[in-house]
Amino acid sequence: MAEHVCPWWLGYLLLCPIRRWFQNPEKILSRYVTEGMTILEVGPGMGFFTIHAARSVGEAGKIVAADIQEKMLNALIKRATKAGVGNRIVAQLIESDDIGASEPVDLCLLINVVHEVPDPASLFSQIKIIMKPTGKVLLMEPTGWHVSERQFQDTLALASNAGFRVIEEPKIPRSRSAVLALQ
């Protein structure tokens, strides 16, 4: 599936304030993120969604931001520190085939990343291992030429094979989206 990984320098474009008009992190995450949660975000880039998630989990919560690009993580930590939530985020440099997470998580954010992962089936299997029994996965993939409806359905089938089920299909502009829970 993944023949191309978003270059680190495009991370700055993904932070564009105009994006908030159609993908507002506060509005999208408010239904899924609560105080005290432990969240794994795979491929957070420079933290478009991460910063809001870190605010929402409060002092008792934690975000594990796992990315294969050190420059993305460095920019994310710099932005999080400036926003006053750097102490709630653990930046984890990972390999492209291993999310490197081991602690139980309440929520996993897979936002615009699965189509870039070399082995999505393995990704979902790894997430299942660390998911708390009541945990959820927020899966969002970009529409247009990035991810077709057929590719998204294939992704959902891989998630199902790994032990997840779709519990919600939120309408998020410019995204194909699903909320997953353990079967």
Image (cartoon, rainbow, N blue to C red):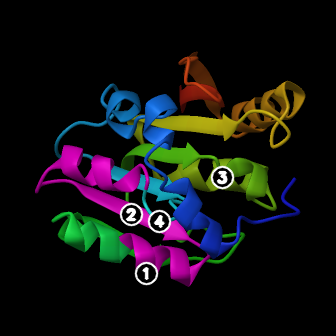
Specify whether 153 is left or right of 141: right
- Image mark for residue 64: 2
**Disc 3: which residue:** 113
Closer to us: mark 2 or mark 3? 3
Specify whether 117 is left or right of 127: right
Q: Earlier in the sequence, mark 1 or mark 2?
A: 2
Q: Residue shown at 46%/75% (left/top)?
A: 73
Q: Residue shown at 14%/50% (left/top)?
A: 58
Q: Which residues are magenta?
A: 48-76
Q: Quadrant of residue 152?
A: top right
**Disc 1: which residue:** 74
Residues at discs 4 and 3 in contact (Cβ within 8 Å): no
| Circle 1 crowding by C-alpha within 10 Å: few under 14, some 14–19, many from 20 | some
Place of residue 141 in the rendered image (x, y in percent of width and height, measured from the top left): 68, 38
* 61, 8: nearer the viewer: 8
Which residue is the extreme one toward the front?
18
Residues at discs 2 and 3 in contact (Cβ within 8 Å): no
Which residue is the extreme one toward the left?
59
Alpha-carbon distance for marks 4 and 3?
Answer: 13 Å
